[in-house]
Image: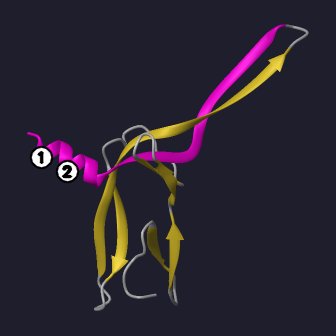
Amino acid sequence: MNGRAEEGQVHSSGSARELPIRIVAGTNDQTKTIILDCPAYGGNSGGPVLEVGQEHSGARKFRPIGLVSQFVPAIGRWVNEPDGYTNTNVYNSGYTVATPMDFVLELVGQF
């Protein structure tokens, strides 16, 4: 490791070494958002998404890369055709959408 987090990495302290954990699953170019491989829950919207790096001195460095904007729902549907019953469950898929800081700062700069 070169002492700084690569894009989309955070670091988890292990007992003997630091292990990179990738949470950026991808981007949505159409909506210009970041897709994170981690769940979000009610109350998380507007919270910071931080990239965690390490300086040469060993100190951790936190850099905001975005703001949580929504969770990605997953829909499970069960259908009993003979009796005409349908059951739909909406649950957390484990993915989160974040708005990049570039866009946030641009928006704040307009005021």
Residue under the image location 34 percent in, 62 percent down: 50
x and y percentages locating residue 91 in the rendered image: 60, 35
Question: Mark 2 highlights which residue?
Answer: 105
In terms of secondary structure, where does tag 2 sit?
helix
Q: Which class describes the residues within 10 Å of circle 2: few (<14), some (14-19), or many (20+)?
A: few
**Residue 110 located within the stretch drawn in magenta:** yes
Q: Which residues are magenta?
A: 84-111
**Residue 26 located within the stretch drawn in magenta:** no
Residue lying farthest left?
111
Residue under the image location 43 percent in, 75 percent down: 6
Taking the image as shown, residue 73 lies to the left or right of residue 43, namely right
Question: Mark 1 highlights which residue?
Answer: 109
Are dots 2 and 1 in contact, CB under 8 Å? Answer: yes
Q: CA distance from mark 2 to mark 1?
A: 6 Å
Question: Looking at this view, is 54 or 25 the one in front?
Answer: 25
Residue under the image location 36 percent in, 76 percent down: 53
